[in-house]
Amino acid sequence: MEPSDGELVVAAQAGDAQSLAVLLMRHRAAMHAVATAVMAAGPDVEDVVQDASLVAIADVGRIRDPSLARAWLTGITRNLARARLRRREPLPMDLTDIPSAEDLERRLDEAALRDWVWEAIGGLSEPLHDVVVLRYFSSAPSYDAIAAALGVPVGTVRSRLHDARAALVARLRALELAAADDHSRVSQARELLFAAIVEEYNGGYEPALLANALAEGARLTVATSAEVFVGREAIIRSLAEDLEAGVRLRLLRVVAGAGLTVVEGAFQNPADAPDHCPPFTTQVYRHRGEEIVSLHLAYSSGAANFSARPGHQ
């Protein structure tokens, strides 16, 4: 039996870094969905999710009710996404309560994760190490302040922080793979399922795989419409227009979480109807066991800097 969120939080607060990694992996899809809902699909979404993960690593000791870990993580993500949307730089802690370096040290000690965090940071190259320490552990974390402290351009600070986040998240993902084999299997199964659904769709066939995955009372909602489609047959009929028009979908990313899958794709419209669908879609599927109980479709007309996974061309 998988541990509950509460059990993972308690273990993480006692110093188990793998429990924290599993917790973040479990709710990564929900965090991704929240960031996308605030900012729309685009390359900044992944940066916000990574920033939120780093905030959680440093601040897990502040969770008062371990059973509310999902709400805590999505709340951090939402705050950071809104801050970035307002063109204000995301801060490493609660946006209304920026801690001093001493306070942050105390929190890390209380969470018993200090050694793991600093071990990960210590493995960074000197330029990356320096910007991370100033960004997340000083009392002046703004890009301008870091640039002044290090005597480098602001653009250099931004690029080094981007590289540092990627390196730290790679370390976190290594822990996730070591501690979350069950989730890895779920992720692989979901990727295979939605790749097969998209392949069937692109073949112009009736979407039997999707129909079989839907619960009898599943609900479909669309961001641009107040209409709700209820039931397997109604949902399949609602997709028939795009299918008959010759619209195709290129699968860009599948993000799986507990009871949630986020699917991102790029539409390819037929030559005689180039504006039939917006360029990009983010689709949120909610699961109950093996069945899909709801799906919400959102669309974006802006350019997105996505990279398709191998085989999803």
Image: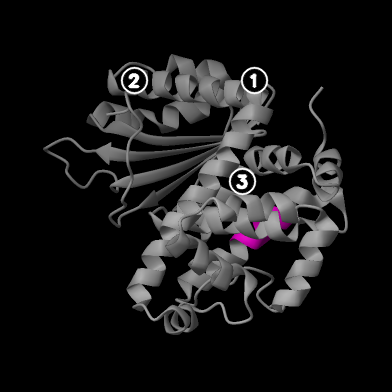
Q: Which residue is mark 2?
A: 199
* Label 3 SS: helix
Q: Amino acid at mark 1?
A: Glu
- Quarter assignment of residue 28: top right
Question: Can you say whether 162 is above or below 290 in the image?
Answer: below
Instruction: Report the label total.
Output: 3
**Depth check, front residue: 169 or 6:** 169
Q: Which residue is mark 3?
A: 30
Q: Which residue is mark 1?
A: 290
Could you say where residue 37 lies in the image, as x and y percent from the top left? 52, 56
Q: What secondary structure characterizes most of the magenta part?
A: helix
Could you say where residue 50 lies in the image, as x and y percent from the top left? 54, 53
Residue at 54% in and 19% down? 189
Instruction: Judge the density around disc 2: few (<14), some (14-19), many (≥20) Cα neighbours within 10 Å.
Output: some
Residue at 51% in and 29% down? 234
Question: Can you say whether 293 is above or below 19 in the image?
Answer: above
Magenta residue span: 72-77
Membership of 74 in magenta stretch: yes
Q: Amino acid at mark 3?
A: Ala
Nearest-to-viewer mark from 3 and 1: 3
Q: Disc 3 versus disc 1: distance between alpha carbons?
A: 18 Å
Residue at 56% in and 77% down? 141
**Depth check, front residue: 20 or 235:** 20
